[in-house]
Amino acid sequence: MSNEFRKNEKKMEHIFNEKEKEIINEKKAKRRTLTILGYICFIIALIAVLPVILSPIFGRHAYLNGTDSTGNISKYGSLVYVKEIDNASFVDGNIVAVTNENKNRTVDVYYVESNNGSDTLTLRTGDIVSYNQVKGKVVAKTPFIGYLSQLCFSVVGIIVLVVLFAVGLVLMMYVNKISKEINQMVEDQNIQA
């Protein structure tokens, strides 16, 4: 009887080990999925924030593109980087960012026709704008990332980005907990074997 008992015990142990292995594999799949989701949350938040945060480090200011009379920038919502230059430095062909009266962080983009030298610029559209309305010369653009970066210019958008980053952080903390559980189960299996 003791031989049969040992055989049954080994059989039960084998079944138990198979169930534990199945549980471990399920946890590994869950960990992998949550890790990917966590990284996606982090990456989206960083792609939205970095272009706006890093631009002042390089002496540029980031603005949303309103209207684009040049055809070079892209659709509404692109992010343009503007460098402030001396008023006398504007020349024919420069692309300039002009303050949009409706919105604070939005600029309209135009070509310079001529620099009148007396506090105004003539644009290729025929409009005359004062230097006070000109934010500076457009030096770069980010057409697709700009749509995400728009979130940085509103309170609701900032809240969304903070929540997205927090969700990524919580997911990664939960992944860490799952990893510890998996390691403990594997360690327990090794001790039993």
Image: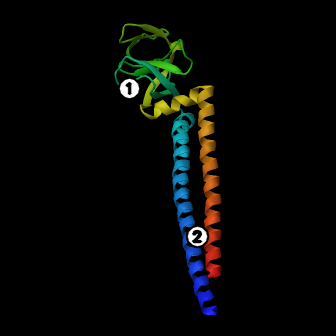
On the image, the x and y values in percent for residue 82 come to: 49, 27
Q: Are marks 1 and 2 in contact (CB under 8 Å)?
A: no
The image quadrant where one finds the C terminus is bottom right
The answer to which of 100 and 129 lies nearer the viewer is 100
Between the C-alphas of marks 1 and 2, the distance is 56 Å
Identified by mark 1, the residue type is: Ser
> As rendered, which of 39 and 104 lies closer to the eye?
39
Q: Which residue is mark 1?
A: 74
**The quarter of the displayed image where residue 180 is located:** bottom right
Residue 189 percent location from the top left of the image: 61, 76
Name the residue at 61% across, 44% down.
167
* Amino acid at pointer 2: Glu
How was the colour assigned to the protein in this rendering? Answer: rainbow
Write down the quadrant of residue 181 in the picture: bottom right
Q: Is residue 99 above or below residue 150?
A: above
Q: For the residues carrying marks 1 and 2, which lies nearer the camera in this image?
A: 2
